[in-house]
Amino acid sequence: MKERVDISQIRRKDAAVFRKRLLHWYARNKRDLPWRKTKDSYRIWISEVMLQQTTVKAAVPYYEKWLKIFPDIKALSRATEKKVLKTWQGLGFYQRARSLLLASKIFSEKFNGQIPDNYDRLLRLPGFGAYTAGALMSMAFQKPYPVVEANIKRVFSRLLCKEEPKSPDFKESLKNVLKRLVPKRRPGDFNQAIMELGALVCRKRHPGCLMCPVKCFCLAYERGVQEVVPFSQKKNYETFSVAAGIIRQGKRYLIQKRPDGGPLAGLWEFPGGKRLDNETLEECLEREILEELGVRVKKKRFLMQVVHYYTRFKIRLSAFQVVPEKMPDKLFGRRWVTLRQMRSYPFPSGSSRIVDYLEKEENALKGNHRGHREKTG
DNA sequence: AAGCCGGGGTA
DNA sequence: TACCCAGGCTT
């Protein structure tokens, strides 16, 4: 019986077979994704950053929208952080957006408006790690650099039948294996082909081994353990209750910017905070409003509630309409804004659903007004 | 090495 | 509901 090829010690001839099968499969089966229609390094960069820890489906509409607003490096480098965050709103990991803006300014000022064609230089830029630098080098500049990300880790943990795809050691050894496999011709297609194989065939659950072009290289498949390699582990969720105070003066609402460095930095929200173990939600609201704004709550009315899931916990966010005993005089960077103005401010997804509610409520009021006038007039 | 950073898709 | 995703950065 023919000996299975060990992909980590692959010989030149077998490596050629592996590449050929993979690229042939890719040419016939790749999805029609917007960033695959361009060779523009800026567009490829944007797509790679958007796709960090983000599914293709979630990234596509943001990619289209982003390029309309910031079509090139120059346009991005001249944008405000507020506009950049607003465009990114809902995509998560907002540091990515800030890093894009920072790096675009560096490209404009130090690299003649171009993305440098140099791995070590890229690696020093904000938002560039080993993956993104390798992706740009191979996909935008056609240089044979390997990349290691979630799909590739899963594909190779099966090919090699290794169970620890999260350890840095695995990542390093995988890089060395891939260095010998990445071809000088079409390195970007090769890297994308493995990722596409991971997304479409070598899936996390229910891998489609029968249609896999490289199953003859796969140790997990040979042993029949492709469903349980790599091993996954459970996480536990914690729930936080959060109270938010909606304070209005005429048509304007009080909003505040989340502090730099913390979670959701730079995004805007309503005053409020987490409920402590020893207090009710309404006590929490009163305490937070007093702590943040220095005023006591005179009247409060429950408006609505949303549950929002984060990666490691979830929050139950309750919005109250609040009338304070007196309007806060020291705003410390807070702003009074109308609902129309609020649309240009970036909000976290949970809070933006409160904004949706307020808009709906205001429209309903307008509707009643018109209806009333028509009836009486 | 481990924790943090988000939101949406998925079964 | 609990998992995961074209990672980067800090401690």
Image (tube, coloured by chain):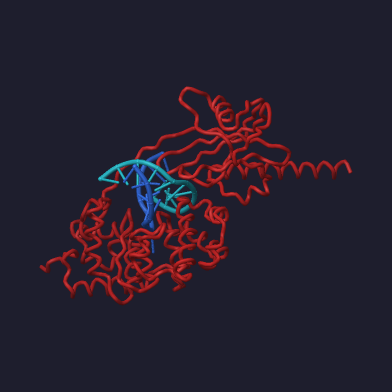
Chain colours: A red, B cyan, C blue
Q: At 60% from the left edge and 49% from the top edge, which residue is drawn? A: A345
- Confirm whether residue A32 shows in the render: no
Quadrant of the drawing holding the N terminus of chain A: bottom left
Q: Position of residue A239 (x, y in %)?
A: 44, 34
- Seen in the picture, residue A33 relative to A285 is either above or below; the reply is below
> Is residue A13 rendered to the left or right of residue A69?
left
Q: Residue furthest top?
A: A278
| Nearest the eye: A26 or A279 | A279
| Nearest the eye: A196 or A221 | A196
Q: Residue furthest front?
A: A110
Q: Quadrant of residue A290?
A: top right
Q: Position of residue A213 (x, y in %)?
A: 28, 68
Q: Residue furthest bottom?
A: A185
Q: Quadrant of residue A250?
A: top right
Q: Position of residue A204 (x, y in %)?
A: 32, 54
- Seen in the picture, residue A86 relative to A176 is either above or below; the reply is above
- Seen in the picture, residue A219 relative to A25 is either above or below; the reply is above
> Is residue A167 rendered to the left or right of residue A2?
right
Quadrant of the drawing holding the C terminus of chain A: top right
